[in-house]
């Protein structure tokens, strides 16, 4: 798998929410974390607690965005179904009109044939 395929495979869908913790607002780099929380046990405990909290926030954001996307897709599908139903009804009306036209043409042919026979006999 080349880099492009790997990037495409890991690409997020268009509805994916943006990170609510951008580096521009929260500028501390990971390397600085050890300076801020020097005790390894506290750093692990804090990382775990923050990870759980951020997981809940991210899960809620992703779920909301996913549901909104599904609602949009459902609305688009309903629109498409309605459009195709309208097309089907229009096609059916044309087919019925064509069937009626065929019957009328057949009736006129018979009338014409009868008139031709009458004119030959007279």
Image (spheres, helix red, strand yellow):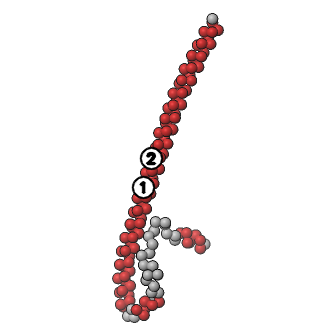
The reply to whether residue 40 is visible in this rendering is no
> Image point 55% across, 27% down: which residue?
102
Please name the residue that numbered disc 2 is placed on. 82
**To which quarter of the image does residue 25 belong?**
bottom left
Q: Vertical placement of 61 versus 53: above or below?
A: above
Residue occupying the point 63% across, 5% down: 122
Pick the quarter of the image with the N terminus. bottom right
Q: Residues within 10 Å of mark 1 (few under 14, many from 20)?
A: few
Secondary structure, mark 1, is helix
Residue at image position (45%, 87%) is 28
Q: Is residue 37 positioned above or below 10 on the image? A: below
Q: For mark 1, what is the residue?
A: 74
Q: Identify whether 113 is placed above or below 15.
A: above
**Looking at the picture, how far across and down is residue 3, in whole percent?**
59, 73
The answer to whether any part of residue 98 appears in the image is: yes
Q: Residue at x 43, y 89 (%)?
A: 33
């Amino acid at each position: 798998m080349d880099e492009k395929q790997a990037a495409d495979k890991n690409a997020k869908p268009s509805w994916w929410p943006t990170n609510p913790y951008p580096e521009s607002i929260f500028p501390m780099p990971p390397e600085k974390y050890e300076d801020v929380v020097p005790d390894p046990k506290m750093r692990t405990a804090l990382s775990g607690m923050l990870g759980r909290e951020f997981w809940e926030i991210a899960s809620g954001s992703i779920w909301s965005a996913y549901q909104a996307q599904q609602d949009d897709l459902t609305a688009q599908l309903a629109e498409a179904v309605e459009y195709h139903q309208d097309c089907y009804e229009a096609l059916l009306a044309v087919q019925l009109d064509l069937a009626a036209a065929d019957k009328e043409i057949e009736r006129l042919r018979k009338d014409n044939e009868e008139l031709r026979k009458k004119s030959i006999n007279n």
